[in-house]
Image (tube, grey):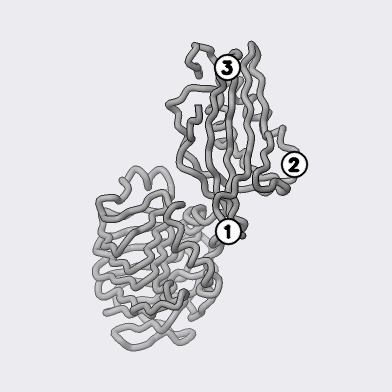
Amino acid sequence: MIKNEKGFVLPAVIMLLLMLSGLLAIQQSTTQFIIKHLGDQSHNNVALYAADGMVEYGLAVMPDTLRTGDSVVIGSYFYGAGLTAEISLVRTDTITNDTIQTYTLYGESQLRSTTNRIVALDLVVRGEPLWDSVDASFLALGGLNKNGGSGLISGNNVCGDSVPSIIAGDPISQNGIPIAAPGSSAPWIGNGLEYSDSLESSLGFEKWDMIRNTSSDADFIVNSGVDWPSAAVFTAGWPSIYMNGTFYLTSSHSGRGVIIAPNNLTIGSGFVWEGIILIGGALTKNGSADLEGTIASGLNKLLGMTVDESDIGNGTMNFVYNTCSIMAALTFFNPVRSAQSWRIIR
């Protein structure tokens, strides 16, 4: 049960009907997208719950004809006894970019003819995904060297699909000896791999440049190991983490989701990750670690920068292709990102 400040009780059943009626209210040609949000539940007012319910239940639609400055009502709700709420969408375009649009979702309620209550959620919409496919278990644009024969780089999909992925990038060597010719193998590489640059071409210059500058969209921006999210965050979802500076990750940083490291990255022993790791510079690793999903290093080469060879040293280092983990982590690159919380206007 939900109460407003005046003690009016709004049954959960009515709230459900409210959300379902909103679904039926959308009749326009739309572009569907996904909104990530955290509703501020400390404000018990109908405007917040009505608008928040629309986000939660997927009423994330964009009128194709809405121009900058235009607004449209996407839901009007009448509870009786003078209690109303209205949800509207306004295109703001506060970001200047041909592929990016910005909107604000407003929820406004009038409680028994008293002062209006208004909440707002800012939305950022990209015209296309930053990155929507991954077909490699490892990409090393600056080259990759592995000392010793322990560990595994496998392109066999552990998600259940028997179709192998590829290993991509610049020359790969074991103990300083190049082994990256098509069809070549070594004890630590495993089966189902071939040399290819398809991941490099699918990522491309423009997309990595945008990804490298998406810190404001990330769930967490970390400046040191102290800023790292808690284990509970990884249990609840697949967060995106943007790293400022050069980092050293150990077992205490294990988790899942997306890591964006614009510079170099060092991985210590015991680190375990599911999802995607994108590294602008070189990857350095010595000791045991396990990664399921995909990892790419040397991406700054796409921007004309010089990158060092990645070196995963000694120890058991396992890179395993997993499309389940990749697809879960790829939600970060969906066309839409939103603000982290509602703004209470009045």
Q: CA distance from mark 1 to mark 3?
A: 39 Å
Number of the front mark, 1 or 3: 1
Q: Amino acid at mark 3?
A: Leu
Number of the front mark, 2 or 3: 3
Mark 2 — residue? Answer: 28
**Which is nearer the eye, 300 or 228?**
300
**280 to 65, vertically: above or below:** below
Mark 1 — residue? Answer: 97
Residue at (58% x, 48% y) in the render: 102
Q: Is residue 296 left or right of residue 201?
A: left
Residue at (66% x, 20% y) in the render: 78
Q: Amino acid at mark 2?
A: Gln
Upstream in sequence: badge 2 or badge 3:
2
Label 1 sits on a secondary structure element that is: loop
Q: Amino acid at mark 1?
A: Asn
Number of the front mark, 2 or 1: 1
Q: From the top left corner, tell me how far across and down residue 161 is, in percent.
A: 54, 63
Q: From the top left corner, tell me how far across and down residue 22 is, in percent.
A: 67, 31
**Which is nearer the eye, 181 or 303?**
303
The quadrant holding residue 106 is top right
Residue at (56% x, 26% y) in the render: 47
Q: Is residue 236 left or right of residue 9?
A: left
**Around disc 1, counting alpha carbons within 10 Å, would you say few (fewer than 14), some (14 to 19), or many (20 or more)?**
few
**Around disc 3, counting alpha carbons within 10 Å, would you say few (fewer than 14), some (14 to 19), or many (20 or more)?**
many
Mark 3 — residue? Answer: 111
**199 to 219, vertically: above or below:** below
Q: How many marks?
A: 3
Marks 1 and 3 close (CB-CB < 8 Å)? no
The quadrant holding residue 103 is top right
**Which is nearer the eye, 224 or 203?**
224
